[in-house]
Amino acid sequence: MKKLQYSPDALEKLHEIKQDVTVRYGAEKAKSVIRKMTRAFRDLQRFETKGPSVENLIGIPCDYRMLYIQHNYAFYRIEENVIRIMDIFNEREDFLWKLFGIKTTTQETENYWGE
């Protein structure tokens, strides 16, 4: 079974998601959201190709795969001995712009946390 690893960006996003959900909906809801997300990531250890290939979805050559979990898009890469969670974007964020520089709207979308 391959090991599951998180990039620093992915870990930071999980922390931000937990903080945001805690403020908006309370600590119990935040725990539930994070639990569902991390369970989906752990499931990749058994079903690593569960998420579709980003290259097949949007035609950009890359080795990322994507999962949609709890209103977030998580991007991961399958490596020799590791499944690496690379980054996580809220569904309101323009992840194509942030990951690949592809503008999908006439204005760059402000990300979920107001940055």
Image (cartoon, rainbow, N blue to C red):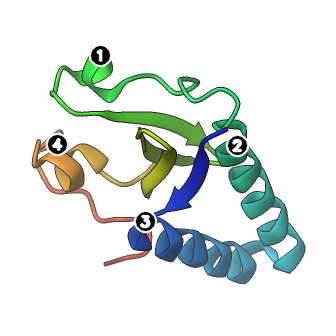
Task: Pinpoint residue 29: horizontal percent, then vertical percent.
Answer: 84, 67
Circle 4 sits in a helix, a strand or a loop, which is it?
loop
Q: Is residue 44 left or right of residue 11?
A: right
- Residue ranking furthest to the right: 28
- Asked if one can make out residue 90 in the rendered structure from this viewpoint, the answer is no
| Tags 4 and 3 touching, CB below 8 Å | no
Asked whether 29 or 100 is in front, the reply is 100
Question: Of the residues under marks 2 and 4, which one precedes in the sequence?
Answer: 2
Label 2, label 1: how far apart the Cα atoms are: 21 Å
- Nearer the observer, 101 or 84: 84
Which one is in front in this view, the residue at disc 2 or the one at disc 4?
A: 2
Residue located 76% across and 48% down the image: 39
The correct choice, above or below, for 6 with respect to 115 in the image is above
- Residue of label 3: 7
**Which amino acid, mark 4?**
Thr
N-terminal label among 2 and 1: 2
Looking at the rendered structure, the kind of residue marked 1 is: Asn
Distance from disc 2 to disc 3, alpha carbons, whole Å, reads 16 Å
Q: Identify residue for label 1.
A: 56
Q: Earlier in the sequence, mark 1 or mark 3?
A: 3
Residue that label 4 marks = 105
Q: Are marks 4 and 1 in contact (CB under 8 Å)?
A: no
**Foreground pick, 13 / 86:** 86
Whole-angstrom CA distance, mark 2 to mark 4, is 30 Å
Distance of mark 4 from mark 3, alpha carbons? Answer: 28 Å
